[in-house]
Image (cartoon, rainbow, N blue to C red):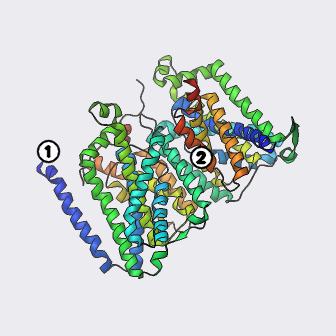
Amino acid sequence: MTGLASMRPTLVGIAAAFATGLVIATPWFVAEGNMRLMIEIFAVFAFAQGWNFLAGYVGIMSFGQQLFIGLGAYFLFLASNWTGANPFLILPLSFVFSALFAAAISPFVFRLRDAYLAISIWVVAEIVRLFISQRDALGSVSGLPLVATREMERSLVATSSFYYAGALALISVFGLYYLSISRLGLALAAVRDNEGTASAIGINVWWTRFFGFVLGSGFTGAAGAVYYMSVFHVEPGGAFDPNWMVVMLFIVIIGGVGTVEGPIIGTAIYFLFRAWFAGTGNLYLMLLGSAAVLVMLISPRGIWGVVKSKSGVDLLGARHASGLEAAAKKSRTIS
Amino acid sequence: MIWVETIVNGLLLGGLYALVGLGLGFAFGVMRIVNVAQGDFIVAAAFLGVFLLPWTPVHPLLVIVPVAVLAFGLGMLLQWLLINRVLGHDQIPQILLTFGLAIVLRNGMVELFGANTRSINVGDLRFMGFDFVGLKLGVLPALILAIALFLFATLHLWLRKSNMGRLIRATADDYRIVQLSGVDFRSIYAVAMGLAMALSAVAGILLAMRGSFTPYSGADRLLIAFEVVVIGGLGSFWGMFLGGMVLGVTQLVALKLDPASGLMYGHIVFILILIMAPNGLAGAFRR
């Protein structure tokens, strides 16, 4: 252990304070239009980190995280429209609602494993999407507007949304870092890597996975609420769109599953791709899909995983070998 | 009487759903692999059927044969070129690889063929009906159930009796031990994936003959396949058949009661079964 390594949490703390200051100052320097793009980037980054947390840290792969994006958004819209309350005050409750929903479905989806667990969450997302699509009180197929923001000043709405999105982005970098070096983070890593060993050293496997799933899904719900709050309208086809999964997977896989830094790179690449291939529709989605296939064939650890192992550079120092890393080392061999 | 007819029609549809799940369940049973792109391959097979239809002699139904053969080859290639490279203790690379493949395939089909709804035209067969103890049933749905039953039984017997079937079962039991007898489990995996794809392709063609499809149907097809396998109890052969029946009946009864519900009630029944019988129906009966 070098002095630098033991000081790392403090250094990361300084970086976090600096980044927070940057986010707070941004509305004074950046035009409203650019701020909207930044809200979107931050929200999509938060979606991706939510999935990265589940897949890379908790060891739960889900193909249904669009469920929580939609739930968070719908909770915010309905609660605000029904009570007339300020959506910015309700937003934290979107986290609570999505987390509670995740807690409610985990007892039975956890009975399945791996791909089956992943798809069963997708099934729940489909149920909720179809349910909302058929209820006029919930806006049916055409969706809901966010009524309360109509009378508010536009720049105030943009600034507030930006701060929420910025907070999510900061949490998904620094919160994830501190979580991963905490007691809970170590318990999660132990469970992810080997459930038998984890329970042998006294970790309650089921509750640890449960807690990770609830936390990650609640976070995705809050991010979904921020995303749709900034566009003032939500409809079931968009909010529960499985293509959200495609975006999350692309960002995390390209960047590196189970790393804090990887999805930052992934998000940058995603938005660059989107800018370059805007208007090509399906071609652009095909590109995302084939990139995922290629990464799996060439290096399942993603860009950041390769950079880290080749150069030894490890910005945050939160090194926990993910399942993918282990898999890359020992592929099925003749025994 | 209308309800009895609905339920019987649900059973006929259920046979087809079971066949949709068979490919996925077989691949999982042998290799512990879940091909997330299975749903989109099913749709791709339907497109292939549409294009081979004009060259199909005797009867349109026979288009199944060339499509199944092509799908078998494609499945072997898929396993050899892609999936075999990412096999390991960890399931994640294989699942993400096939997920990526699914995205490419789906959007590629939209790009090539457009998003229109299509179906495979089997001529008069689609509208023919017959009376069965007072029930009016379609000839095509009954024929499809017969094909599904035939494929289930054939696969079952082939796995029991044939040499290759024995190798596949041995590989499923322990892919490492099999190698002591000089068998490369990767080749066996390729054959198994080819079979899984051929079965799925047949299901895809039959679905396209009974109903319709778009390039986006893959997601629904995958969810049906997945639910059939889980309801059946992960790897139980005839459990899957039962799972298909449950889903088929649920869907047709639900559509009678609530025409706009789509697959929602099928999904709900799946979740209910997961709550009540975590090991699937086959598991519930076994205990």
Circle 1: residue type: Met
User: Gap between marks 2 and 1, in whole Å?
Assistant: 53 Å
Find disc 2 in the rendering and name its residue: B267
- Identify the residue position indicated by label 1 in the image: A1
Q: Are marks 2 and 1 in contact (CB under 8 Å)?
A: no
Question: Does the image show residue A170?
Answer: yes
Viewer-nearest residue: A183 or B93: A183
Q: Are marks 2 and 1 on the same chain?
A: no
Q: Secondary structure at mark 2?
A: helix
Give the secondary structure at mark 1. loop
Amino acid at pointer 2: His
Is A296 in front, or is A227? A227
Residue A318 percent across, percent down from the top left: 25, 49
**Residue at the (57%, 38%) spot, across then down:** B273
Residue at the spot x=36%, y=76% of the render? A159
- Residue B194: image location, x then y, percent: 62, 34
Q: Quadrant of the C terminus of chain B?
A: top right
| Left or right placement of residue A133 versus residue A288 in this view | right
